[in-house]
Structure formats: structure tokens, C-alpha cells
């Protein structure tokens, strides 16, 4: 018997925000002084670094980047919040099993899958290849209720992965998950053949309540971040980007998914806390923490940051990530967006090393913000 997943109607009128470029919600911008488009000379230098840089760890990525076959927390307590990292930004969150008469329930919590890029190559199998190990087949995924996408770059919105996920979920569980997207991304996924009412496009700060029959509910909140979008050379920023918040109405469990985001706009290639503190930071993360935090845990990007002059407005380095952690009021976090695809020329194994130093620099306790193996599940008491 299939599990029915429905979303409650949204009653508020959509209002143009400072991040809208036009009146129709068809073009967007980062409305903060922490963002600046990189200069042509900087991008040329970056491309040269990518072409000429040598990284011996890249050749050994399958052995150096820890990985395991995911269990998705099958043996962990059902009343815990469970989070499984599947590489890059792809992550599966399972909320705690709803308190009550378990005989009437399915014995699991609501499951939300973020940014699933789960094949060996993105971009229809011809794009960049995963350097580390694919943890599982898409058919190995458990029953999923919601898929949420942060933005439409190919390393986060992979149509081939989505096609296979929806097909296998239909075959195995006789259902298809709801698909949540930031504004004006329907055209990207319209070829998947999903009913229009099963794809929800949301603006920053909008929220929806999802009801999963026999399982529970989750509140999905589309939250700001500092990034960009494009699928071609002529559609830059015509679609919105976002982070996401999950709230469980039955427990105190909550998650902030950072997706892919910058934090500041540094003018030097530095990771020093005192130096980076001189530059403006994106105020959205403190707003998220103040309005929706604290969060049981966060999934926060830590990689693809070199060189900082080019990447800091778009990608966080660990010294940015730990400040985002504090701004959003996460209680614990897992570092994502590293160790999967070669996006930038820093050493492939470097982000966790920098994260450890950065966490110490801002006074975080050991293992509060850490990394896990690809395929590993962590559980959190709520």
C-alpha cells in the first residue's frame, strides 16, 4: 500500500523581496554588500589554476575519502533525528518517529532528501566524474517523502539522478515524493513528467506543511543564502537559490540545510579569522538563526573555496562555515560540499583539516561541527 504525501495550501500573498530583480519573480540577485561578481581577470587566473594545478590526493580519492555502504540509521533509535551524507551536498534526513500509538504508524519518521546527485557522473552522464566512491545505488534508497533542491547548478540538480529516483520510488513504494524548488525552476524539471501540483516552487521565507499519511508531518521553510544559478550561458540568475529549514511539529527536531552558499567577500586568499573578519558578511544567516533557530543540526558546506578572491561570495571556506554555524544557531553540524567532485583547485582532502582549525578559532567544542564518511548516518537526540 502506498504512502500518501500531501501539502497544505499556502494562503499568504507572495510579495516582491529585495532579491527580486523584476516584478514577475523571473530574475534574482544577492541584495547584500557581501556579494560581488568576480572580475574577468580573477576567473581567468582561477581557470589557469584548475588546468595547471596538481593534486596527488585526487588520484587516491577513492581510498582517502572515507566511505561506507549506508544503512540510513536502520539500527539507530527511531526517536532520534537521523542524517545520512551521500557525498557533495546530497543528504537524507529522517525526522524522529512520531510519538503515539506506533501500531497505527509506519515505524519511521518523515524523510527528506536534499540535492540528490547520486550517479557516477553528473550532467546526463557526460559531465564531471565523481572522484570519490558512490556510496549506494539509487535503488537502495529507502522510501522518500520529500526531495528539496537548493539551486539549479548541475552538481545540485541532476536530472538523471532525479529521473531514476522517481522511477524507483514509484516501482518500490508505489509513490513519488514531493519536489521542492526555489522560485522559477519548474522549467528545469518539467521534462520529468511530474504532476505540476507535486512540484512546489518557493520564495525565501515561505513555508509549507507536508503531511505524510501514517508517518507524520514536516514544515519546510525556504530560506536565503548567497549564491547564483545557471543551466546555460544565457540564464544566469533567472532562477532563485536557497537554503532550507526542516521543522518537526511533534518534537523539537530541526535541521538547517545550507546547500551551496558563500558568506562574505574577501579580497585576499586568506583563512585567518582576524583577516576575514574585516570583510562584510551576509546578514541572512543571523536572520535565519533569529527567526527559525536554534537547530538540532546543520548541513553546512565547507569546500570548493580556492581562490578566496573568486569563490568567497559563492562558496564558504571552513572559516566561513563555522561563523555560519554560529549565526544560524546550529547546535551540531556536518560539513558537506567537499570530497566528491573537483570544483576548485584546493587539495581534495583539505577542507576537513581547515574545518578543525576554524572550529578551534571560533571556540567550538570538539566534534560539535565535524565531517563524516560518505554513506555514514549520524543520529541526534531531541
Image (spheres, rainbow, N blue to C red):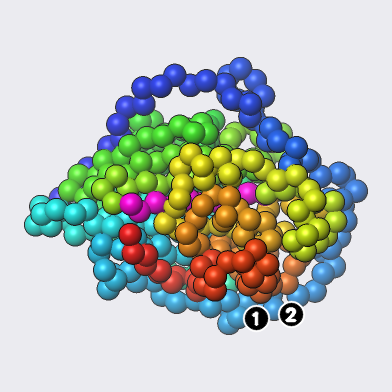
Secondary element at tag 2: helix
Q: What residue is shown with label 2?
A: 56
Majority secondary structure of magenta residues = loop
Check the image and report above or below for 253 versus 243: below
In the displayed structure image, the side of residue 79 where residue 156 appears, left or right = right
Does 202 appear above or below 308? above
Residue 230, given in percent of the width and then of the height, sits at: 65, 40
Q: Position of residue 217 (x, y in %)?
A: 27, 44
Query: Label 1: few (<14), some or many (≥20) within 10 Å?
Result: some
| Residue beneath the point at 70% across and 45% down | 281
Residue at left offset 86%, top offset 44%: 39
Q: Which residue is mark 1?
A: 60
The answer to whether residue 289 is seen in the rendering is: yes
Q: Position of residue 57 (x, y in %)?
A: 69, 78
Foreground residue, 252 or 6? Answer: 252
**Is residue 277 placed above or below 351 in the rendered structure?**
above
For the C terminus, give its image quadrant: bottom left
What separation in Å lies between label 2 and label 1 (alpha carbons)?
7 Å
Q: Position of residue 194 (x, y in %)?
A: 38, 37
Q: Secondary structure at mark 1?
A: loop
User: Residue 368: within the magenta?
Assistant: no
Horizontal arrangement in the rendering, residue 380 relative to residue 126 (left or right): left
**Mark linked to residue 245:** none
Asked if residue 37 lies left or right of residue 315, the reply is right
Q: Does residue 176 appear in this view?
A: no
Q: Are marks 2 and 1 in contact (CB under 8 Å)?
A: yes
| Magenta span of residues | 252-262
- What residue is rendered at 51% in x and 52% in y? 329
Q: Quadrant of residue 208?
A: top left
- Position of residue 204 in the picture relative to residue 177 (left or right): right
- Residue at 59% x, 25% y is 17
Q: Is residue 258 inside the magenta stretch?
A: yes
Amino acid at each position: 500500500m502506498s504512502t500518501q504525501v500531501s501539502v497544505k495550501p499556502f494562503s499568504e500573498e507572495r510579495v516582491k523581496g529585495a532579491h527580486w530583480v523584476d516584478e514577475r519573480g523571473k530574475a534574482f540577485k544577492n541584495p547584500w554588500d557581501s556579494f560581488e561578481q568576480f572580475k574577468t581577470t580573477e576567473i581567468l587566473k582561477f581557470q589557469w589554476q584548475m588546468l595547471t594545478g596538481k593534486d596527488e590526493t585526487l588520484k587516491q580519492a577513492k581510498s582517502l575519502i572515507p566511505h561506507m555502504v549506508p544503512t540510513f540509521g536502520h539500527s539507530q533509535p527511531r526517536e532520534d533525528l537521523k542524517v545520512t551524507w551521500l557525498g557533495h551536498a546530497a543528504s537524507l534526513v529522517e525526522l524522529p518517529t512520531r510519538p503515539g500509538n506506533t501500531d497505527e504508524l509506519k515505524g519511521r519518521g518523515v524523510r527528506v532528501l536534499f540535492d540528490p546527485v547520486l550517479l557516477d557522473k553528473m550532467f546526463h552522464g557526460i559531465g564531471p566524474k565523481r572522484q570519490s566512491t558512490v556510496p549506494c545505488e539509487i535503488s537502495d534508497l529507502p522510501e522518500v517523502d520529500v526531495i528539496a533542491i537548493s539551486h539549479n547548478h548541475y552538481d545540485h540538480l541532476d536530472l538523471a539522478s532525479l529521473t531514476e529516483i522517481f522511477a524507483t520510488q514509484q516501482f518500490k513504494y508505489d509513490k513519488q515524493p514531493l519536489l521542492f524548488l526555489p522560485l522559477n525552476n519548474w522549467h528545469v524539471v518539467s521534462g520529468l513528467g511530474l504532476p505540476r501540483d507535486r512540484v512546489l516552487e518557493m520564495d525565501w521565507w515561505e513555508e509549507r506543511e507536508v503531511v505524510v499519511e501514517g508517518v507524520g508531518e514536516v514544515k519546510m521553510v525556504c530560506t536565503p543564502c548567497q549564491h547564483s544559478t545557471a543551466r546555460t550561458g544565457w540564464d544566469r540568475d533567472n532562477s532563485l537559490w536557497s537554503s532550507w529549514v526542516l521543522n518537526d511539529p511533534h518534537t523539537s527536531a530541526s535541521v538547517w540545510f545550507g546547500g551551496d552558499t558563500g558568506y562574505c567577500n574577501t579580497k585576499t586568499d586568506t583563512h585567518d579569522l582576524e583577516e576575514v573578519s574585516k570583510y562584510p558578511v551576509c546578514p541572512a544567516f543571523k536572520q535565519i538563526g533569529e527567526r527559525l533557530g536554534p537547530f538540532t543540526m546543520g548541513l553546512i558546506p565547507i569546500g570548493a573555496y580556492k581562490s578566496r578572491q573568486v569563490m568567497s561570495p559563492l562558496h564558504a571556506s571552513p572559516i566561513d562555515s563555522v561563523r555560519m554555524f554560529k549565526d544560524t544557531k546550529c547546535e551540531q553540524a556536518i560539513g558537506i560540499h567537499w570530497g566528491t567532485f573537483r570544483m576548485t583547485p584546493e587539495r581534495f582532502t583539505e577542507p576537513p583539516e581547515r574545518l578543525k582549525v576554524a572550529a578551534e578559532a571560533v571556540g567550538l567544542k570538539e566534534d560539535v561541527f565535524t565531517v563524516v564518511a560518505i554513506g555514514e548516518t549520524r543520529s541526534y537526540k531531541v
